[in-house]
Amino acid sequence: MHDHDTSERLASYADVLAGELPDTWTSSYLEPDAKDDLAELAERIWDLDLVAASLAEHPLKQAAVLSRPDGAQLVIVDRYDERDGFLVAAVAPHALPNEAYRAVREPNGIALADDPFLGAEQVAGDLLARYDRALAQARHNALGHIRPSQPDRVVLTWQSDGSIATAPADDRASAVLIAHGFVHDPQSGIYRLRGDDTQPQARTLREIGPRLDALGIGIALQHPAGRTAPAAAPATASPVPANARTTTARSR
């Protein structure tokens, strides 16, 4: 049975910490029953040091997530070294393709004091600066892996993780993409359609073609050599050869 006092302590700590950090942060608590959300979160923890080592021995059973309006997130987890306090780590954004993280140094997490006011000073004076630098570099890298769109054409680019990314030049195109499941990263301007299931992905490509065509906007689909588009891709798609597909993903 989960310790209610431990849950309350983590949630309360995160609430205070969020209110003390620079800019605007909100806090949410993931309880042990939220197993799918915790598993997905664990995959996105951007750390190869202290927090990664802890999670390797103690899988995520609860967590508090701090979120900033620009999409940045921090996760606070339990500490198992018999010291008071918690561990905090950066979270890699959903919207960026894996290629964006290549050669970006991980903004490894830190141990926090038991006092959330002191903990906020630790985060603001160390982790946040490294996280913001890493985010800026990853977002810049992401743009380099996406062929620019034009007002009359949306260029969709395959990513090595199976997702599709684009940076539309027209607000009308942006609205169509959002309506069909693309996730927008406001900092980079990238719109990304996840590729976990190719059938919904292919259906989305079929649906956006006519919607964009009605606006006088065409589609071009760019994919790495050796990668073929789903059979249900829109007929207007015009594949353009790109560099060979890589298997490098962001490190954790």
Image (cartoon, helix red, strand yellow):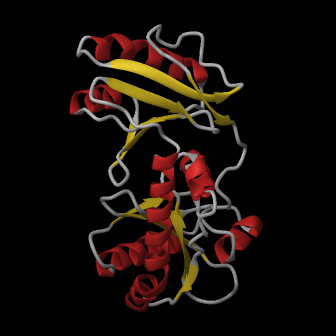
Residue 246 horizontal side relative to residue 219, left or right: right
Tally of marks: 0
| Image: 170 above or below 129 | above
Report the quarter where the N terminus lies.
bottom right
Quadrant in which residue 182 is drawn: top left
| Image: 184 above or below 209 | below
Report the quarter where the C terminus lies.
bottom right
Instruction: Work out whether residue 147 can be spotted.
Output: yes
Q: Residue at x 47, y 7 (%)?
A: 235
Q: Residue at x 43, y 87 (%)?
A: 125
Q: Residue at x 42, y 78 (%)?
A: 13
Q: Position of residue 137 (x, y in %)?
A: 49, 63
Observer-nearest of 53 and 99: 99
Observer-nearest of 238 and 201: 238
Quadrant in which residue 231 is drawn: top right
Q: Residue at x 48, y 40 (%)?
A: 146
Q: Position of residue 78 (x, y in %)?
A: 59, 74
Observer-nearest of 196 and 237: 237
| Image: 124 above or below 48 | below
Q: Position of residue 55 (x, y in %)?
A: 69, 67
Instruction: Work out whether residue 65 can be spotted.
Output: no
Residue 79 horizontal side relative to residue 216, left or right: right
